[in-house]
Image (cartoon, grey):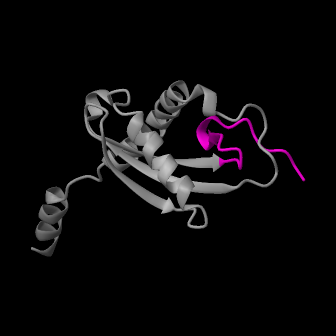
Amino acid sequence: MALSVAALLSACQTPPSSAPQASATVNKLYRQDAAQHIYARNADRIYKGKLPPLLYAIGVLQVQLDAQGRVKNLHWMRKPTHAPEVVAEIERTVRAASPFPAPGRTGAVSYTDTWLWDESGRFQLDTLTEGQLSQ
């Protein structure tokens, strides 16, 4: 009897879903498209070449987009609180770049990128960075 119950319970279990892993892969791939989109909209503001060893600000921002590529939400994972003007400018830049490329079949997408901000006001995104000079 116990074996029958155990067999029945194991048959009722659902196999582990691969959705979180698949979603993470899609989001990581989308980050490249989003970074290229931001660079295309801000070509004159991109820091060319390797960044200096000391940056004015570094921020990590998660961007949530709907199925049409419109910004739904911004969530700071690491906000450069010492530079509120940079926070405001990054948020303005992301919102001004909307709509982003449509995520396609996946519908809404959420991606995270690191903003590397020079004191000149120019920036690179970690996804497309040219690196940083050593001290």
Left or right side of 102 for 32: right
Screen quadrant of the N terminus: bottom left
As drawn, 47 above or below 118: above
Residue 76 lies, in percent from the top left, at 46, 59
Residue 56 lies, in percent from the top left, at 70, 55
Asked whether 82 falls inside the magenta stretch, the response is no
For the point 26% across and 39% down, the residue is: 66
Residue 20 lies, in percent from the top left, at 35, 50
Magenta region, main secondary structure: loop
As drawn, 96 above or below 19: above
For the point 77% across and 42% down, the residue is: 51
Left or right side of 62 for 44: right
As drawn, 106 above or below 81: above
What residue span does the magenta drawing correspond to?
117-135
Q: Nearer the viewer, residue 7 or 108?
A: 108
Q: Nearer the viewer, residue 94 or 27?
A: 94
Picture quarter containing residue 57?
bottom right
Asked whether 119 falls inside the magenta stretch, the response is yes
